[in-house]
Structures are given as structure tokens and as C-alpha cells.
Amino acid sequence: MASIPEDKPVGASAIEQRRAADHESFLSHKRLRWLKIATVFCLVAILIYAFTPFEPRANGGTWYGYTLGTIGALLIVWLSLLGIRKRRMTEGHWSLKAWTSAHVYLGLALIVIATLHTGFQFGWNVHTLAYALMMLVIVSGIYGITVYAMLPQRLSDNRKDMTTEMMVEALGALDRQLASAAQPLDRADADMVLAALDQDPFGFGLWTRLSGNYRRCATQKALDHFSGGYAEDSVDGRIRSLLSRRRAQLAQMRRHMKLKAMLEVWLFVHIPVTIALLAALTVHIVSVFFYW
């Protein structure tokens, strides 16, 4: 006997599809639609380059070169509009996820398009400069994709259910305990503790955050100063215990800052070089059409 299907609320299928789409990565959007489109486009471009007889061989000055050059230039301009697109919240075929997916895979396709456009002819000129800047933008973009795929989970693991504000508050609580515990110390010992408390945990440069090498850490210096075998219930022993906890809290915050810096630092290359690429591309196009 045939089973009777269970009733489902109206629109349940649409809701399930929406939830699945919300959890879908922009890299796998619509079952890798834009990867497939970009791959097909690159294969067609390569096949035309390989099997169409060009005399002289295909380069930027042939019909094939002009065609790929036009496509590449339009793609570069369109890809640079992602920053504007992020400020508009819409859904559908050109949702931000779809746009970002297309941005990634069509941006990678530019490697093939632009290289075939050059006909592998490079020199010390603005045309090669535009190509080099484009490659630098793509490489920085690949780095950005990699860190965004890997680091958010590490950020979450490092936070241990703590927000940035909670980490700062925990450090502040330790600092108040240290300031109170250091009052009975002599001047030299108290100065070591105060130096640790006075040091701005966010005052280190970008390279220090990325490397994680805090050689000028006053907390570590103070901990080294209180390195003797003190009894835990003594003043010095309590200071050492609090300094150890402060070092651990700082380590958590510094890992957080390092991961955040790794997530953001690529934009300091990607965006300025994209602007430089647009400028070089403009000069490249003008020089081709007006001086050649």
C-alpha cells in the first residue's frame, strides 16, 4: 500500500532552499556556476589561439588581440566595482554572493585572457606595466580568498566565546588586581609592574602584529623579573601569578589581532594596486588607439 506523504507547510521548500543558499560559500555558489563559465571561456580562448592561423602570430595588434583586450578591459572595470556593490543589499541572480563568486573566477580567468592578449610579448613599457599590476591584483586577491577561507574559524576558536570587548575587560580586571597587589612592593619591583600596566597592548605596529614577535613586551620583562621561587601566598608570588595570567590574556588578544591583521592587510595592497591598474590600463588604451 502506498504511503501517504506528510503534509508540509506552504512555502517550506522555498524556505529550505533559502537556508541552504545562506550556508553556501561564495566559492561554491550555484554549484560552481562561475567557475564553469570561466573555465569554458578560457578553454575557448586557448583553442582559438592554438588553432587559428594568425599572420603574424596572435598578439595585441590582431583582431584576436583586440577582442581579448576589449573583454579584459571591460572585465577589469567590472571587477573593480565589487566595492561599490558591497554597499548595496539586494538578492537574486546578482546578489552579493553571486557577484563575489563571479568576481573570483572571472578575475582568475583574466590571467589567461590578458596573457593571450599580449601574445607573450613583454617589454619595459606601460603595456607590460598594466599586465604586471593586473597580476599583482590577482595574486593579492588569491591571498585574500585563502585567508577568508581559513582564518575565520581560527578567530572563532581563539576567542573561546569571548568578544573583543570581553577580552579587553578581562585584561582590565587583571590590571586592577595587579595595581592593588603591587602596592606593598619596593620601588624597583613596583616600577616593573607599573611599566607592564602602562604599556598599551594595542600600541605595536602592523609588522609586530603579523609576526607575533613582541620583544618589547613589558609584561614578559616583569614576569622575568619575578622569576624567583616565591611562595604562592607571598606578595611576590601573587604578583607573578597575576603577571602570568596577564601574559596569557595578552597572548589571546595578540593572536586575535594577528588573525585580524592577516584578514585585512591584503586590502592595503589589493585596493591601491587596483587603482594603479585602472590608471595604467587607461594609458595603455589611449596609447594604443591614438599613438599606434
Image (cartoon, helix red, strand yellow):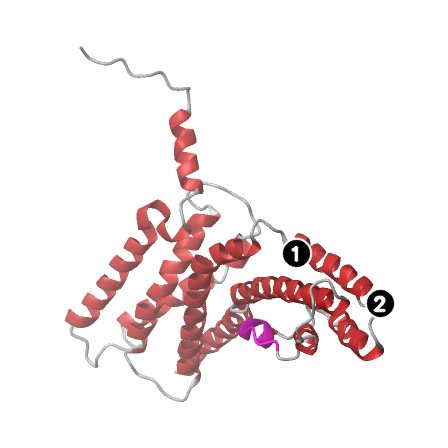
Q: Secondary structure at mark 1?
A: helix
Task: Tell me where residue 118 sits by quadrant.
Answer: bottom left
Contact? badges 1 and 2 (CB < 8 Å) = no
Q: Could one spot residue 96 in this view of the protein? A: yes
Q: Is residue 2 left or right of residue 263?
A: left
Decide: few, some or many residues near mark 1? Use Cα within 10 Å; few <14, some 14-19, many ≥20.
Answer: some
Residue bounds of the magenta highlight: 207-214
Task: Measure how far apart labels 1 and 2 are at the Cα level.
Answer: 25 Å
**In the depicted view, which residue is nearer to us: 263 or 141?**
263
Question: Which residue is at a point 80% across and 76% down the rendered structure image?
Answer: 191
**In the depicted view, which residue is nearer to us: 157 or 180?**
180
Question: Which residue is at a point 56% across and 67% down the rendered structure image?
Answer: 258
Residue 125 % position (x, y): 42, 86
Q: Is residue 239 left or right of residue 184?
A: left
Residue 69 % position (x, y): 35, 70
Decide: few, some or many residues near mark 2? Use Cα within 10 Å; few <14, some 14-19, many ≥20.
Answer: few
Q: Nearer the viewer, mark 1 or mark 2?
A: 2
| Residue that mark 2 sits on | 183
Was residue 228 drawn as part of the magenta stretch in this picture? Answer: no
Q: Could one spot residue 71 in this view of the protein? A: no
Residue 144 % position (x, y): 46, 64
| Residue that mark 1 sits on | 167
Which amino acid does the dot numbered 1 rest on?
Met
